[in-house]
Image (cartoon, rainbow, N blue to C red):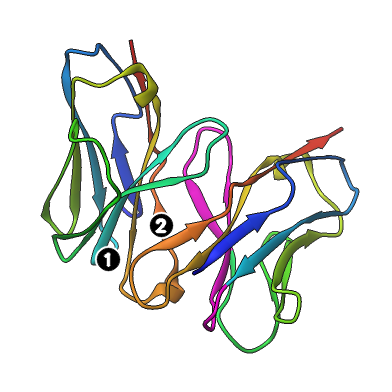
Amino acid sequence: ETGVTQTPRHLVMGMTNKKSLKCEQHLGHNAMYWYKQSAKKPLELMFVYSLEERVENNSVPSRFSPECPNSSHLFLHLHTLQPEDSALYLCASSRSDPGDGYTFGSGTRLTVV
Amino acid sequence: AQSVTQLDSQVPVFEEAPVELRCNYSSSVSVYLFWYVQYPNQGLQLLLKYLSGSTLVESINGFEAEFNKSQTSFHLRKPSVHISDTAEYFCAVPFTGGFKTIFGAGTRLFVKA
């Protein structure tokens, strides 16, 4: 399997639930990212992992908890979310050369009810 | 500081007409410049990029962009659009010293029959 794979594609959760988003890449990339894409708002960078170490955390609320167990997998653990957290969550990966650009997954459409 | 401005949030155009999606950037250092495309219900895909050399870069599906240093622009053009080009287009500038990329707010191209 090639590219960046995100599961699930769609998720509906209540505000008291705990769920996790999964991202997997088999491109040999050494950096992975979580982005949030909301309607009528720019892409928001949430977290960056390089070689399994978190190198960026853009003031994301603690109800979002990332995990990067190895260079191929990235998780986003969710708990006690709010309705305004409903969005498309995109995972991306890249090599360390910024000229290569990112490879994005298809995203998880999250709806918080 | 680096920034990216996409001047049009939506561009409606008839099929087979030409189109230009505008992007201006601000950077005090040498830049790489990217255009990404996001088709409905998908993640972003790298469309084309400028790293160095020829200021005119092309994609495999007929889009082209020209790096203009004096005007700090990287506008995306296509001489004749198809219905299948309907998507959102993002201009982006990666930081050359790290893993962060600045994305524009996006331009939604809507091609009408």
Q: Residues within 10 Å of mark 1 (few under 14, many from 20)?
A: some
Which chain is home to disc 1?
A: A
- In the image, taking residue B39 as reference, residue A15 lies left or right, namely left
- Residue at the outermost left position: A69
In the image, what residue type sits under mark 1? His
Q: Position of residue B112 (x, y in %)?
A: 84, 33
Q: Specify start and end residues of the magenta stretch as a single range.
A: B27-47
Q: Between A75 and B92, which is closer to the camera in this rendering?
A: B92
The residue at which mark 2 appears reads as A103
Residue at image point 33% right, 55% down: A2
Above or below, A22 relative to A94: above
- Label 1–label 2 contact, CB within 8 A: yes
Q: Secondary structure at mark 1?
A: loop
- In the image, taking residue B26 as reference, residue A93 lies left or right, namely left
Q: Between B85 and A75, which is closer to the camera in this rendering?
A: A75
User: Where residue A29 is drawn, which disc sits there?
Assistant: 1
Residue at image point 55% right, 80% down: B51
- In the image, taking residue B23 as reference, residue A103 lies left or right, namely left
Within the magenta stretch, is there residue B41?
yes
- In the image, taking residue B103 as reference, residue A109 lies left or right, namely left
Task: Give the spatial CA distance, label 1 vs label 2.
Answer: 9 Å
Q: Position of residue B35 (x, y in %)?
A: 60, 61
Quadrant of res B83: top right
Q: Secondary structure at mark 2?
A: strand
Residue at image point 38% right, 63% down: B100
Of mark 1 and mark 2, the one earlier in the sequence is 1
Q: Are marks 1 and 2 on the same chain?
A: yes
Above or below, B74 relative to B53: above
Q: How many marks?
A: 2
Which chain is home to disc 2?
A: A
